Amino acid sequence: MSWAVEEWKEGLSPRVLQKIHELESQVDKLKRERQQRQYQLETLEAALQKQKQKVENEKNESAILKRENQSLMELCDNLEKAKQKVSHDLQVKESQVNIQSSQLNSCKKDIERLEQELKR
């Protein structure tokens, strides 16, 4: 079959044959370059898709972390409010204890005074 491919070149001058050979060589070289660039393009496209997937995964992880952070901030706010309430309740109870302690001391003094009066 290759003889049929070469048959059309019969009778051409050596200079034309040389030029045809150069052009065929150049076509082969360009085909190899095109294949190499196609491979490079496919490799780069695969790398791009991998990077896009990585970015998407990181976006999803970031969204999850933001939601978790928001949840933790709300929990901290609730704990702070509870702490303030407990602190306020403690102050109220300490105040009540102080009042009752004062009343107790006053009653003790009254009892001592009454006991002194009874002894007289």
Image (cartoon, helix red, strand yellow):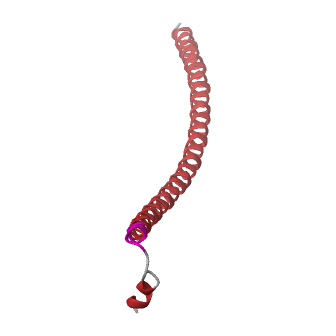
Identify whether 88 is placed above or below 9: above
Front-lying residue, 28 or 112: 28
From the viewer's perspective, tell me whether residue 63 is left or right of residue 43.
Answer: right
Quadrant in the picture for the N terminus: bottom left
From the viewer's perspective, tell me whether residue 1 is left or right of residue 59.
Answer: left
From the viewer's perspective, tell me whether residue 69 is left or right of residue 5.
Answer: right
Front-lying residue, 93 or 100: 93
Quarter assignment of residue 110:
top right
Counting the numbered discs, the total is 0
From the viewer's perspective, tell me whether residue 21 is left or right of residue 57.
Answer: left
x and y percentages locating residue 97 in the rendered image:
56, 24
Quarter assignment of residue 28:
bottom left
Quick check: is 67 in the magenta stretch?
A: no
Q: Image point 41% across, 63% down: which residue?
A: 33
Front-lying residue, 1 or 19: 19
Identify whether 37 is placed above or below 114: below
x and y percentages locating residue 85 in the rendered image:
62, 33
Front-lying residue, 23 or 89: 23
Question: What are the residue bounds of the magenta stretch?
Answer: 13-19
Q: Image point 52% across, 13% down: which residue?
A: 112
Identify whether 99 is placed above or below 42: above
x and y percentages locating residue 3 in the rendered image:
39, 90
Q: Which residue sits furthest top?
A: 120
x and y percentages locating residue 86 in the rendered image:
58, 33
Quarter assignment of residue 23:
bottom left
Main SS of residues in magenta: helix
Q: Which residue sits furthest bottom?
A: 1
